[in-house]
Image (cartoon, rainbow, N blue to C red):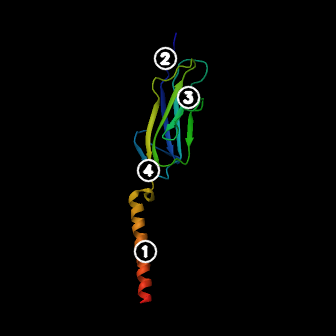
Amino acid sequence: VASAPPPVYITHFRVDGEEKKLTNGLQLAYDENYCVFQYAGVSFKSGRPVTYKYRLDGLEDQWHEPTAQRSVTYGSLPPGHYTFQVTAFNADGVESAEPASLRFVILRPFWQHWWFVVLALLAFSALLYTVHRLRLRRML
């Protein structure tokens, strides 16, 4: 008799120690980049504990090897788009039908936007021009 695939759920998402809502599309500031995910799978089969494999799409291409660990921590995440995915295996090795997932974005700091770079270049150019004009005025 084949056992049913275990459902899996993301139960908690903490960012810098603060609990966040489990809603897709959450936007985080560039310095909110220390993330802890907790998850649980449900299996009514006795025997070995439920094991999990997970990945953070946007940072990792490969799934981590199955483990009984029910949480994972990612620190110092760079700005970008991410999807955390986790799937469970019951005692018979049957995998969840669908992985649980959570999408979020870590926004870039303002100084990494194109408009800031352009403004900084314009300000630096204006400063150079002003210094040049002052030197010319002194020489004349």
Q: Which of the two labelled residues, at mark 2 and mark 4, occupies the earlier sequence position? A: 2
- Crowd class of label 2 (few under 14; some 14 to 19; many from 20; radius 10 Å): some
Q: Which is more toward the observer, 30 or 63? A: 63
- Crowd class of label 4 (few under 14; some 14 to 19; many from 20; radius 10 Å): some
Q: Which of the two labelled residues, at mark 3 and mark 2, occupies the earlier sequence position? A: 2
Write down the residue under mark 3: 52
Tag 1: amino acid: Leu
Q: Evaluate if marks 2 and 4 touch, with contact meaning CB atoms under 8 Å apart.
A: no
What numbered label is drawn on residue 127? 1
Tag 4: amino acid: Leu
Q: Residue at x 38, y 59 (%)?
A: 115
Tag 3: amino acid: Tyr
Q: Residue at x 41, y 56 (%)?
A: 113
Seen in the picture, residue 14 relative to 116 is either above or below; the reply is above
Q: Which of the two labelled residues, at mark 1 and mark 4, occupies the earlier sequence position? A: 4
Q: Secondary structure at mark 3?
A: strand
Which residue ends up furthest to the bottom in the rendered image? 140
Q: Secondary structure at mark 4?
A: loop
Write down the residue under mark 2: 4
Q: Secondary structure at mark 1?
A: helix
Image spot of residue 71 (x, y percent): 56, 36
Tag 2: amino acid: Ala
Write down the residue under mark 4: 107
